[in-house]
Image (spheres, rainbow, N blue to C red):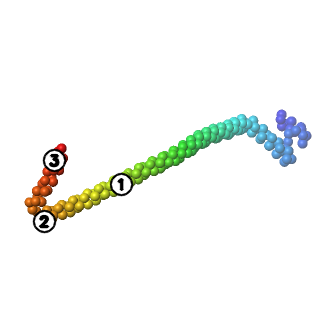
Amino acid sequence: MSITILAELPFGHGWGINTNILETNIINLSVVIGVVVSFGGDALRSLLENRKQSILNSIKEADDRANEAKARYEQAKLAFDSAKTKAEEIQKQSVVAAENERTQILKQLEEDKDRLQQVKKDTVRFQEQRAVQQISEKVVSLALSQVRERLQKRLDNNFHTSVNNFHIVLFTNYKA
């Protein structure tokens, strides 16, 4: 029956071979696109949705990392400011400590100077006393040697009697 229908149809009407390449390609292309869209559309939509989700997740992770980096930067900045403040405080304390040390050293130096002046005065006084003592000993020694010489020159009884009488008088005056 179908063979008789084809034979009855005039040539060029209905079913037949289309020799126009442009029309044929457009028809073939529309059929292929229709088949691809109907069968591959869901897979393509799913693939595109997965890719979209992957991109959104990457963007979200990048934002999270950026926020974490920003928070760490702020913490580091606060730590830096704190360290800077502490360093300035330490520097001020070191200046104060250096000034105190300088004052203490000057005070100690002044005390040492005064002590050395006193030692110098004491040494001079001691040397003076020693010199006076040595001179006194020499004077006494010379006086005694002169007295001995005189005594040896005048060793007679009259001289002994007069010396003894002189001392007796001094002794009696001392007791009274």
The residue singled out by tag 3 in the image is 172
Which quadrant would residue 40 be assigned to in this image? top right
In this rendered view, identify the residue nearer to me: 97 or 33.
Answer: 97
The residue singled out by tag 1 in the image is 121
Image point (36%, 55%), residue name:
120
Q: Position of residue 115 (x, y in %)?
A: 38, 51
Marks 2 and 3, the one that precedes in the sequence: 2
Looking at the image, residue 78 sits to the left or right of residue 33; the answer is left
The residue singled out by tag 2 in the image is 153
Q: In whole angstroms, how far apart are the C-alphas of marks 2 and 1? A: 47 Å
- Amino acid type of the residue tagged 3 in the rendering: Thr
Quadrant of the image containing the C terminus: top left
Q: Position of residue 23 (x, y in %)?
A: 85, 45
Residue 109's disc number? none
Question: Which of labels 3 and 1 is toward the front?
Answer: 3
Q: In whole angstroms, how far apart are the C-alphas of marks 2 and 3? A: 29 Å
- Amino acid type of the residue tagged 2 in the rendering: Lys
Other-residue count near label 1 (Cα within 10 Å), few / some / many at <14 / 14–19 / ≥20 = few
Marks 3 and 1, the one that precedes in the sequence: 1
In this rendered view, identify the residue nearer to me: 40 or 31.
Answer: 40
Image position of 34 with respect to 98: above or below: above
Looking at the image, residue 14 sits to the left or right of residue 59; the answer is right
Q: Position of residue 50 (x, y in %)?
A: 67, 37
Question: Which of labels 2 and 1 is toward the front?
Answer: 2
Question: Which of labels 2 and 3 is toward the front?
Answer: 3
Other-residue count near label 2 (Cα within 10 Å), few / some / many at <14 / 14–19 / ≥20 = few
- Amino acid type of the residue tagged 1 in the rendering: Lys
Marks 2 and 1, the one that precedes in the sequence: 1
Image point (45%, 50%), residue name:
106
Residue furthest right as drawn: 10
Secondary structure beneath dot 2 equals helix
